[in-house]
Image (tube, rainbow, N blue to C red):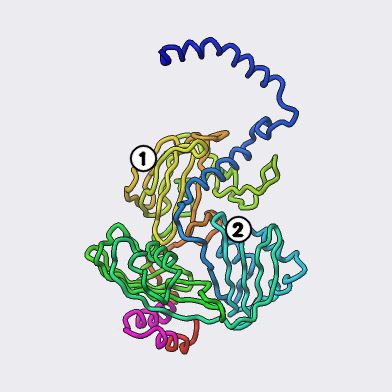
């Protein structure tokens, strides 16, 4: 009875509902919503970026980690800021504008350690510049400003060698290792990221890890933990690799674990209609709402090609992003393609550099045909048009010599059976890179 009544009930009220809707349409509330404005291309892009970006962040991925770099001769901070640290240039200008600390940024020199912590959406949370092992300066985000202070703690670097057997998921195998208490998640994520074919990992596989920890004396926990080298011996996967000064991993003979990348995922150049911009302001609300990708003005049906070898992580539909594809390239590199017309690959499929994966379109919330292309490194969106991309399969010449020299100690340590204390001593006594 109820079921039969429901449609008639609705039909009866429908004219009233329509009338009500018309009244609201012609007599909007005195405070118009931002949506009442005509939606420009930029507004749509903003919607596309923030909503979709947040939807794709894996809920359980580990918190942001400190990253670091040792300043080299000829380094310019503004260049590093954009291409190495992947931070908005506007933040550097803000720090230079602040009375306190600005001169520290003007006076950087080779050999200094610079460390930074960035949020998942690419904003600087904290910055440290060390004058030496014991003294440095720190900027910590406080709203739109940064609190500046001196650091005078002894900064210590320790190396820890870990050995284990894969048991279920990697993080389980790292439990009960007191040297890395509280860091298991970060280390598991690092190894997971750097294993080239993690689907080939099996229970019972053996692994050894060499982890570098940085401590401020007095702190109960290291503030930075980095995987420096690893060996993995399994049924289907055997590999050993070490970190190079470019922060990428290479096998002992210099073969890169990350494939070479093309700059654009298209077969020819197209006009860029909207650039990557972490500081873009919403044209109506004035709030910072970043554009995490590069937009190419492409006619519908333009072939999209994989910029590097990889595996299709996701294909799907999103109200703002439309038809989209996400490809994992290993080593923390991931690319995303939005507003597609047709998708030509399936989830889990391996793709080669240059292989056609989709056709551009105008799907989702988009004002015109274009391709929105994103590159993420270690969970952070970066400017794919500017960032230094992996360009070779293997190190050669001077780079290879340097890597062979520097990785020798790392590999030797990985192979040795030593206590943590002995290890820390032996590595600290060698000249640091
Ligand atoms: Zn876009």
Q: Which residues are magenta?
A: 402-424
Q: Residues within 10 Å of mark 1 (few under 14, many from 20)?
A: few
Please tell me which residue lies in front, 249 or 184. 184
Residue bearing the label numbered 2: 123
Q: CA distance from mark 2 to mark 1?
A: 34 Å
| Mark closest to the chain's N terminus, 2 or 1 | 2
Please tell me which residue lies in front, 170 or 48. 170
Residue under the image location 41 percent in, 79 percent down: 160
Residue 168 left/right relative to 399: left
Q: Can you tell which mark lies on residue 166? A: none
x and y percent of residue 12 in the render?
Answer: 54, 10
Residue bearing the label numbered 1: 344
Q: Residues within 10 Å of mark 2 (few under 14, many from 20)?
A: some
Point out the quarter of the image occupied by ligand 1. Answer: top right
Please tell me which residue lies in front, 383 or 269. 383
Residue 253 visible in the picture: no
Residue 254 left/right relative to 33: left
Dot 2 falls on a residue whose secondary structure is loop
418 within the magenta span = yes
Q: Is mark 1 within 8 Å of ligand 1?
A: no
Please tell me which residue lies in front, 61 or 260. 61
x and y percent of residue 115 in the render?
Answer: 57, 71
């Amino acid at each position: 009875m109820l079921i039969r009544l429901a449609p008639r009930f609705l039909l009866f009220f429908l004219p009233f509902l329509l009338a009500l809707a018309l009244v609201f349409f012609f007599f909007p509330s005195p405070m118009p919503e931002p949506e009442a404005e005509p939606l420009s291309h930029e507004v749509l892009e903003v919607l596309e970026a923030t909503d979709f970006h947040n939807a794709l962040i894996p809920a359980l991925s580990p918190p942001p980690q400190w990253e670091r770099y040792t300043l080299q001769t000829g380094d310019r901070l503004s260049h590093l800021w954009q291409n190495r640290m992947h931070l908005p240039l506007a933040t550097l200008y803000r720090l230079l504008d602040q009375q306190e600390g600005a001169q520290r940024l003007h006076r950087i020199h080779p050999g200094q350690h610079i460390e930074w912590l960035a949020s998942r959406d690419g904003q600087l949370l904290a910055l440290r510049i060390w004058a030496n092992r014991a003294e440095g300066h720190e900027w910590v985000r406080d709203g739109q400003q940064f609190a500046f202070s001196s650091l005078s703690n002894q900064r210590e670097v320790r190396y820890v060698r870990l050995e284990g057997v894969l048991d279920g998921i990697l993080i389980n195998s790292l439990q009960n290792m007191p040297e890395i208490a509280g860091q298991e998640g970060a280390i598991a994520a690092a190894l997971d990221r750097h294993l080239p074919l993690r689907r080939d990992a099996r229970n019972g596989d053996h692994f050894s890890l060499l982890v570098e920890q940085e401590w401020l004396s007095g702190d109960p926990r290291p503030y930075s933990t980095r995987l420096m080298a690893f060996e993995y011996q399994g049924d289907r996967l055997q590999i050993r690799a070490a970190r190079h000064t470019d922060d990428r991993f290479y096998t002992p003979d210099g073969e890169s674990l990350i494939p070479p990348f093309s700059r654009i995922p298209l077969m020819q150049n197209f006009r860029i209609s909207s650039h990557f911009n972490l500081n873009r302001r919403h044209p109506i609300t004035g709030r910072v709402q970043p554009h995490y990708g590069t937009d190419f003005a492409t006619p519908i049906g333009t072939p999209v090609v994989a910029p590097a070898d990889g595996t299709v992580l996701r294909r799907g539909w999103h109200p703002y992003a439309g038809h989209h594809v996400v490809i994992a390239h290993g080593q923390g590199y991931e690319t995303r393609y939005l507003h597609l017309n047709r998708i030509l690959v399936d989830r889990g499929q391996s793709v080669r550099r240059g292989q056609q994966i989709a056709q551009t379109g105008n799907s989702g919330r988009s004002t015109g045909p274009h391709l929105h292309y994103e590159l993420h490194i270690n969970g952070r969106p970066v400017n794919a048009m500017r960032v230094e991309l992996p360009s070779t399969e293997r190190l050669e010449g001077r780079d290879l010599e340097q890597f062979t020299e520097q990785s020798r100690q790392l590999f030797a340590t990985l192979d040795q059976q030593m206590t943590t204390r002995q290890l820390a001593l032996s590595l600290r006594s060698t000249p640091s890179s």
